[in-house]
Amino acid sequence: MAQTQRSGCPINLTLEQLGDPWSLIVIRDLMFGNRRSYGALLSQSEEGIASNILSSRLKRLVQSGLLTRSDDPSHRQKGIYALTEASIQLVPLLAHMGAWGRRHTAASETLSVRAELLEAGGPDLWRAFMDELRHLHLGAPRPARSVFAELQAAYEAAISKGAADGAQGD
C-alpha cells in the first residue's frame, strides 16, 4: 500500500504516521496498559474506540512498522500485538505530550498520574521504561527496575483514592 507524502519534512512524516486521532491512543494502551490483544484494546479503551477504527489502526500500525502482530497460541484467529523499537522510542514524545496536557488542558487527575511520574522522572526514567518495554515486547533481558509496575501502582492508587474521595462525598 503506497502512500503519497505531502513533503519530506520530518514533522510532516511523523504526523503522517501518527497524526490521526487514534494511532497514539492505541500505542499508549499497549505501552502503559499492556493491552496486547484486539479484545483488550477494544474493551478497555477509556476513549471508547469503535471496533472498525481499532481494526483499521492496528492494520496500519503493523504495516508502518510501529507494531507487530503474532498469532495467539491459545487461539489461532486471535493476534497478540507488540511494540517495535520505533514505537518504544516514542516514550519521550508521549511523556512530553502528557506533561503538556497536564498543564494546558482539563486533564483527569487519575489519568494524569502516569504522566506526572514520567515528567518528574525525566530522561532517566524514560530510558528505564524503554528498557522494560524492550523486555516485554522484544524479548530483551529483564531490567532490574520495573517502571511499568511503578506506573501501574500509582495509577491504581489514584483510582482507589478517587473512589474513596467519591464515597466520602456521598
Image: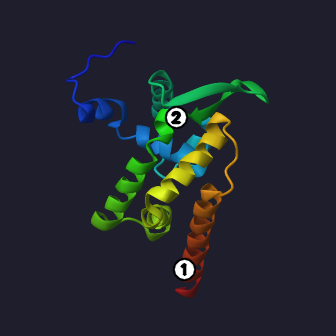
Is 28 displayed left or right of 144 in the figure? left
Which numbered circle lies on residue 166? Answer: 1
Q: Quadrant of residue 138?
A: top right
Instruction: Residue at 65% x, 42% y: name it.
Output: 135
Looking at the rendered structure, the kind of residue marked 1 is: Gly
Which is more toward the observer, 167 or 88?
A: 88
Q: Residues within 10 Å of mark 1 (few under 14, many from 20)?
A: few
Element on which disc 2 rests? helix
Q: Position of residue 78 (x, y in %)?
A: 68, 28
What colour scheme was applied to this rendering of the protein? rainbow
Looking at the rendered structure, the kind of residue marked 2 is: Glu
Q: CA distance from mark 2 to mark 1?
A: 40 Å
Which is more toward the observer, 103 or 121?
A: 121
Residue 18 visible here: yes
Is 33 displayed left or right of 109 in the figure? right
Instruction: Residue at 46% x, 27% y: name it.
Output: 56
Q: Position of residue 142 (x, y in %)?
A: 70, 47
Find disc 2 in the rendering and name its residue.
85
Q: Earlier in the sequence, mark 2 or mark 1?
A: 2
Is 118 displayed left or right of 133 in the figure? left
Q: Position of residue 125 (x, y in %)?
A: 51, 58
Element on which disc 1 rests? helix
